[in-house]
Amino acid sequence: RAVKRRAAAPQGTGAQDEEEVRLFALILKKNALEESKCEENLKNYLETLKNATLEPKNVHKKLNNLNENEKIKAKCKEIKTKIQDKCTEFERKIGDEVKKQSAKLTNDDCKTNEQQCLFLEGACLNDLTENCNKLRNLCYQKEREKVAEKALLKGLSGALKNEGTCKKKIENVCIFLKQESDELMILCLNQETTCNTLVEKAKSKCSSLKQKIENLLTKDNELEKKCSQLLSECYFYGQNCENDPPKCDNLEKKCKKKSIIYTAMDSNFDPTKPETTLTEKIGLEDLYTDALKKGVYIGRLPPKREVALLALLTLDLSDSNKVSDRKRKCEQLLEEICKDPQKHKVLQELCKNKAITEEGKKKCKELDKELAEHAQDVSKKIIKYLITSSPNKLTSWHELYTFISKKECVRLQSDCFYLKGQDSLEKLCDNLKAACYKKGLEAVANEALQDKLRGKLHGSNGTWFENLQKSLVEVCKELKGKSDELFVLCVQPKKAALVLSTDLRFRAIFLREQLNEKRDYPTGKDCIELKEECSVLIQDSEEIKWPCNTLNEHCIRLEGIKQLEKELLEENKGYLKDEKKCKEEAGKRCEKWLRRGNNKFSFVCSVLELACMKITANVKSKCNALKEHMKARNVITEAANKATMEKTCRFWTPYCQKFISNCDDLKEDGGNDGDCKKLNKNCELFFEKKKIEDKAIDELKGSLLNNTGCEETLKKYCTQLNNATNGLETLCKENGKDEADVRKEQCKKLVKQVQEKCLGLKNELTEIKNDLEIKEEKYKKIKEEAEKAMENANLILSRAKGPDNNNKSVNKDSSNAPKEGKGTTGFKLVRRNEKVHVTEKELTAFDLVARTFDLYLELKEICNHSLKNCGFKKECDCEDPCKKIQGICSTLEPLKVKPHEIVTKNITTTTTTTTTTTVKDVKATDCQSLQTTDTWVTKTSTHTSTSTTTSTVTSRITLTSTRRCKPTKCTTGEEDDAGEVKPSEGLRMSGWSVMRGVLVAMMISFMI
């Protein structure tokens, strides 16, 4: 974040001479004025560059061709004259400039003279240290005063038409602003003078604003660049302009066509949060950030002791900040303050019954002694940070140490401010202010270079420092002309490399100190600021890696707590009244998320007690804020008033609906109805009306871009509602009114509601689109993994037989996807196996299927919500994100679910084979086979359940042989009767035994 070059020199030969003088004055200092020393130091400088294998011409073009002694000698002779002339001219000029007060110095005075001081202070024979120190401190002070004036100009918006209106408001404004800076404190202590000054400045603002707007209205191509700034000025300064005011309304219309709308800080009122503070309304933090870019540190004052405030109040500002007769002034002042001690609460204890106490008189008597002791303490701290051995001497700019934090700068400068007039601090405080200014300016330049050199600012091998200088020279080709501080660094690569790496080291140390304080329990603001600093420094600092990781985890936890609170609040079931209920409900969800492998709230689930403590405290705070805001704004009475009912109910009832179940005081208060319950009763008529309007908006979406389109569509719609009784007919007619007027009035209201809905909807849908694209990829991947896992484990997904389909018939139209609707639908992963235990493959499949359905339902919920909003894509100009959302949502498919069906088939097959064979045998005693009949009876039973087949096959084989035998000779001598036919025994064969299948069912139940 480099600051703009503060004094752009004119182009041409003169500009080149100016830059040459700055270059050699900077690198040679006073040696430039002695030719022999000039030659020696210039050779050393060039040798340093060559040792780092740097080409001098790449550092600066004026260093080119200085590779011979004669050329160096000639350059030293030439540059001596130029620097001497410059010194003579500037020494005379700066003597006049430092006699001015800070208010009299112009911006150009500061820019030009500060630049000359930067380059010539160390080069001129006559010491410029004192005058340059005074000049810088005057310019530094001017910037601080400017910020304080801007803050009051904004805080007194609309009250600067004259001194009278200013005096009425400034006292109240100062209650909130006087502690925000030393300069604001002074302005608030001298309210009459301040009002006179600010009224004149307000008039000047009106004139300049009028002129700037008139110029801009004729230049459409500059609107996008300047609209925001000028609309902001209109908001804060335009209200003070009575005569011939600037054309802010015209500007607003023009800017609106470019989709630029100014939103004031207090316009987004949230009744569940504390009231927007005055510092937030005027954007004080932004004013301080802008000052920081100019090297000026301003911060809220630390709490002051009685002695410090009395020192400031008794200072004789008209006597060159010297103290005169402090005891007398102190008592007079306290007597005045004690008449209204609320103005200075720190001094309240020195007053009683609107009079000064004995303790107060004692404090005034010993004030000088206490101030001397306090000054001594401050002196020691300043010496510690400035590392100076000459506390009573001003230090040159280039010799000032800047090993001091922003926090210490703010604190010690404030001490100096309150202790003006203490001689022991005068020089030290001047050095301190200069050091803080220098640190601020250098910090901007350092960060600009560090941003380009990430990852190169540390190293352990012998070449990293040399490589850093090479990289620095390359980066400087683009940056060295951006500011004087960047130029100083870029033409001294070795020094710059040391400065940048050391500065980064100190930044890491300061960051670690902050992380040690805040990383375990960071606020939302801490997370934003410290995480940004971590991301910048972690590439070059190993020591902050783990503290930054810890911070990141706790910030994720903090965000998770916010999301969990949001989810539980949306359910609106009163889980957040106390920590116990919160923990129970959150615990159930954590179990479910853990089963499904959803790591969304893993950090929160590990610290449920802390999470619920924060959530319940936060909800209680919001409930109290809502209750207080409702009372302060007399909401119940406003809702009962027919004229203000609609506006009041439309704004306040959504908050009541969201919080009433978790805020008992809003439901019932001391045995009586609570505010929200009262509000709901007063808004019953509004609820009925809103229900009709919501129906109308839903019916007319796509036609609510403007009043004309709405009226045309509503007219057609009304022809169909002539005899309607569903409430929508009230959109078309009203007793005693012309139907066209009724439609016009209704459309005006409906279009306005849609326009309000459209505010931010495009950004919201763009964010949803981006989120959907990421989640769609994730879903496709996990779905594919789940399908493969089911296949590998021989599992299918089946819809469980529900209580509503106990009949035996099969629903042939059952869907392959989970049905949407109320209630719980069960799904089973089914596998038939001979083993009862669950295998690892099955567990993997179960886990993946659960996570797939979890993500599918999340996506469906996002789709349903966003597609509903996309119904207004035409009105809200969000067709592009909606097209993408529609594309993703229309192709979103769940895992395929097999319908539950049972099919049983019985097949009986009988096969009979008869074979007749005649055999002639010479032996009459042998049997002759007359006929063989084989009968095969096969019965097949097929049972199909959920597309998985279990077959039980029983085969019965009957072999029947019929034989006719002749009488045979038997060895026993016995004979059988001829012709007897004996059937043989039937042969029974048992086929496959019944295979008994084992179902492994894993239920995946979820809400549709």
Image: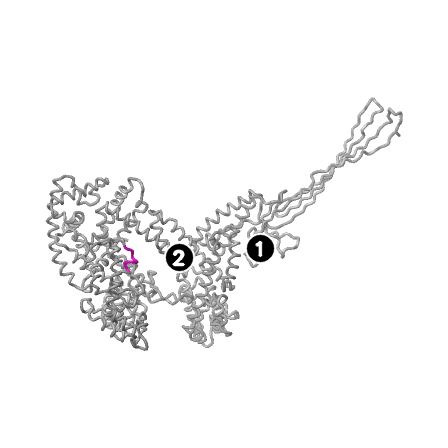
* Magenta segment main secondary structure: helix
Give the left or right position of residue 474, taking residue 831 as reference: left
Camera sees residue 323: yes
Closer to the observer: label 1 or label 2?
2
Q: Earlier in the sequence, mark 1 or mark 2?
A: 2
Q: Position of residue 546 (x, y in %)?
A: 39, 49
The amino acid marked with disc number 1 is Thr
Q: Is 852 in front, or is 23?
A: 23
- Three-letter code for the amino acid on which mark 2 is drawn: Pro
Residue 407 lies in the magenta-colored region: yes
Q: Which residues are magenta?
A: 404-410
- Circles 1 and 2 in contact, beta carbons < 8 Å: no
Residue sitting nearer the eye, 943 or 1004? 1004
Tag 1's secondary structure? strand
Residue identifier under label 2: 522
Residue at 43%, 63% (x, y): give it: 703
The answer to which of 652 and 355 lies nearer the viewer is: 355
Image check: 130 left or right of 691? left
Q: Which residue in the protein does label 1 denote?
A: 825
Residue 607 at what x, y percent from top left? 47, 55
Q: Is residue 882 above or below residue 181?
A: above
